[in-house]
Image (cartoon, rainbow, N blue to C red):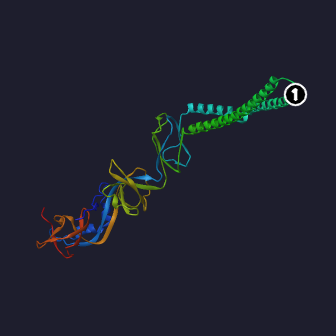
Amino acid sequence: MKIVRSFSITDNITNHQINIVKAIITASTFLFSVSCQLKGDKIRPVVASISESVYASGIIKSEDQYQAFASVSGIIQEQFVTEGQYVTAGTPLISIKKENQKLNVENAMISASFADFKLNKDKLAAAAIVVDQARYRMLNDSVMLVRQKELWGQQIGTKVQLEERELAVVNSKTALQTAIINFTELKRQLRYNAAQSINNLSINKQQESDFTVKSNIDGIVYNLYKNPGETVGPQTPLALIGKADSFLLELQVDEYDIVKINPGLTVFVTMDSYRGKVFEARVTKIYPEMNEHTKTFRVEAIFTTPPLKLYPNTTLEANIIIQTRKKALLIPRSYLLNDSVVIRSDGEKLKIKTGLSDYLQVEVISGLQLNDELIKPIP
């Protein structure tokens, strides 16, 4: 006999008796358990609906719900919002004391001002003058060398004087090359210092902004976990933020049942906050990773018609409907012997083939007629 995880109605509806959902889907089945009774424990099968379902527990979550964290450590200085307040993306939520960071920003501003390329053009101008002087000296030495060669051609002067002029030209060329290199390197260094100081200033300003936690979305502040004066760190949740009017169901489905779940399946939900009521939802997403500790998979669903009021982290229980048969031949499970045998009122034992079942009834696929009268087996 195929046993499925499903639930049936009881008279007292509680959160731990989600089987009311099963009864709503197959209300006629419950009636069957009463109306098909004959005298004593004799019954006849009835035709009614039965559904296979998978049980899941879970919570309500606001769409885009997230916990806000600070990226720095420190002491909470001020809270700019209150719980239940609507905020827009970018709204400051909490500030953390940042005196030291303010000093870092000021130092970075001083460094950026000192390293400003425009303010260091005098250094470049001085280096350019050195280049010009070296170039003039080289030209002058070159002219003097030409004259000395002319005199040498007229046998005027000495060999030493000619060699001195040649050496002077070599030295002046080297000096010019050195001056040009120094000018280029100074210019590069000034540009680098200016860019680096600007980046350092930007980094410090960004770090300063990290001391103010802001909302990432338009939504509601559902919770503020800490108060001014408390110490927090990067691993400390500070606030719970989520959409104001859009909620989803986060379900935990056992690994045994996960292969049966597909997007689009109908879900029937009960919550302690709405005792006695059943809400319909639809599976929208299945997360493929299993939680190793709970041996469950995370499944998301959305309400078809949501309740008027919902709050994050409200607990729920649900039945995910896998399949439904509207015209099934049903008998009470208590009339089944060894999962595949029933006893007719004349005492004859009949071998039957079963299909879907829940805690109250079982589907008979073959081996039994609608007018067969059955008796309950003696335990």
Left or right placement of residue 232 versus residue 271 in this view: right
The image quadrant where one finds the C terminus is bottom left
Q: 287 and 251: which one is in front?
A: 287
Indicate the position of residue 182 as horizontal and vertical percent values: 71, 32
For the residue carrying disc 1, how many other residues have a C-alpha within 10 Å: few (<14), some (14-19), or many (20+)?
A: some
Report the amino acid beneath label 1: Leu
Can residue 116 be seen at all in this image of the molecule? Answer: no
Question: For the image shown, how many numbered marks are present on the structure?
Answer: 1
According to the picture, the residue beneath numbered tag 1 turns out to be: 151
Q: 17 and 256: which one is in front?
A: 256
Indicate the position of residue 213 as horizontal and vertical percent values: 53, 41
Quadrant housing residue 185 = top right
Q: Provide the secondary structure element on which disc 1 rests.
A: helix
Can residue 178 be seen at all in this image of the molecule? Answer: yes
Indicate the position of residue 217 as horizontal and vertical percent values: 53, 50
Q: 120 and 210: which one is in front?
A: 120
Q: 194 and 26: which one is in front?
A: 194
